[in-house]
Image: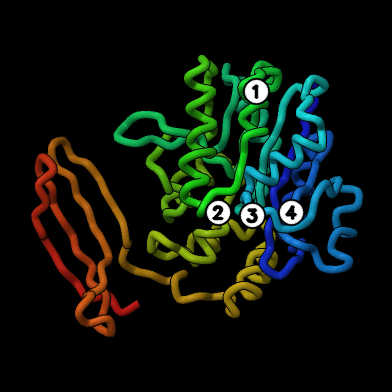
Amino acid sequence: MIKRIALFAHYDRDGLVDDYVIYYLRGLTRVADRILFVSDCELRAGEAAKLEGLADLVFAGGHGEYDFGSWKRGLAHLNYDLTGWDELILANDSCYAPVYPFEDAFEKMNKVNCDFWGPTANQIKGKFDHISSYFLVFRRPVLIDADFLSFWKEIEPQPDVTAVIVKYERGLSRLLVEKGYRYGSLLPIAGIGSFLRTNYVHDYLHSYRSSWLKVRLLRENPLRAVNVGNALAKTETLYPRGLIDAHIIRTLGTARPAHYDYRFVGSYERKFGPFKLQSKIKRNKKRPQAPLLWKLYLKLFHVPVLAFVWPVRT
C-alpha cells in the first residue's frame, strides 16, 4: 500500500476556505493518507473549522512566498523528514478539482516508470522545460535526496510570481532532471500555458480523464480562449457547476463574464512543415477606445506575412 502525504497551498483574498477548495480536499483524501493545509493569508473566524476531518491546518498568515513558501512551511512542520512516506503530493487551489477522480490519474501514473510527475509537462522549442507546479507528485528516491530537501529550505521571497516560476517551478524540475531523476506527465507534453486554452478542455481534459480545470482559465481567460462557457458546460456532469459559479460570482460579480464568449482566439499557432499559422489579438495603442484587432499571420521560415485583419468588439 502506497503511503502518501499531501501539502496543500492556499490563498484567498477574502480569507475564506471556499467550497470548491473543500471539494478538492475531499477528493484528495481518496489518494492521500494525510493532508497539511498551509494558507498565505489570515483566515476569517470559523474558516479553519471547515478543515476538520480533511486536513491539518499547519499555518495561516501572509508570508509572501507564494505556493512554494507554503509548501516549505509544510515540510518544515515535518522537520524536512519524509522517510515515513512513499510519495509526496504538492497541490494548490489554482484548479477546480477533481473533474475526473484523482484515483484515475494515480492508477495510470503508477504504471509509469518515473521519479516525479504532474498532469502537465511543458516544453519550449520542442524540448522539455518543466512540470507545472499546480500538482506535483514525488516518489521515494526523490524524498530522501538531500538536494531536494535543501531546495525547500532555501525558498525565499521573490519580487513577483514570474520570478517564482523561473526560480522555483522551473528550477525544481531542472534540479531533479540534472540529477538523473525521470519525469512523467499525465497529459502529452505541450507548450507552456496549454491548460489556459479552450482546447485543453476539448482535447486533453476529457480525452485523458484529467482531474484539473484551471481557475484562471475561467476567472481571467488570459489567452482569450474561445467559447469558454461552452467548454465549461461539458464538465457539468462531472463536477458541481454550482461551486464554479459561486466562486466566479464572488470574485467577478457575475456567473457569466464576457470572456466566456470570446469568438476570436487571442493566441494561436500551428505548424505545417516550413509554414506556421499564427493569430494575435492586439489593441490600437494610439486609439485605446477602438475595437481590438485580430491579426492572422502566415510565417515562412520565421518571416511573418500579415494575411488577415478583423476588428473584434468582444
Q: Is residue 238 visible?
A: no
Mark closer to the observer (3, 1) = 3
| Residue lying at 57% horizontally and 19% vertically, measured from the top left | 114
Mark 4 or mark 3: which comes first in sequence? 4
Residue situated in front as seen by the camera: 277 or 208: 277
Q: Which residue is mark 4?
A: 39
The picture places residue 174, in percent across and down from the top left corner, at 48, 27
**Amino acid marked by disc 4:** Ser
Q: Looking at the rendered structure, which numbered label has been put on residue 214?
A: 2
Image quadrant in which you'd find residue 133: top right
Disc 1 on helix, strand or loop? loop
> Gap between marks 4 and 1, in whole Å?
30 Å
Mark closer to the observer (4, 2) = 4
Disc 2 on helix, strand or loop? strand
Residue situated in front as seen by the camera: 29 or 69: 69
| Residue lying at 86% horizontally and 59% vertically, measured from the top left | 48
Q: Which residue is mark 1?
A: 110
Q: Is residue 314 left or right of residue 203?
A: left
**Amino acid marked by disc 2:** Lys
Disc 3 + disc 2, Cβ < 8 Å: no
Q: Which residue is mark 3?
A: 64
Disc 3 on helix, strand or loop? loop
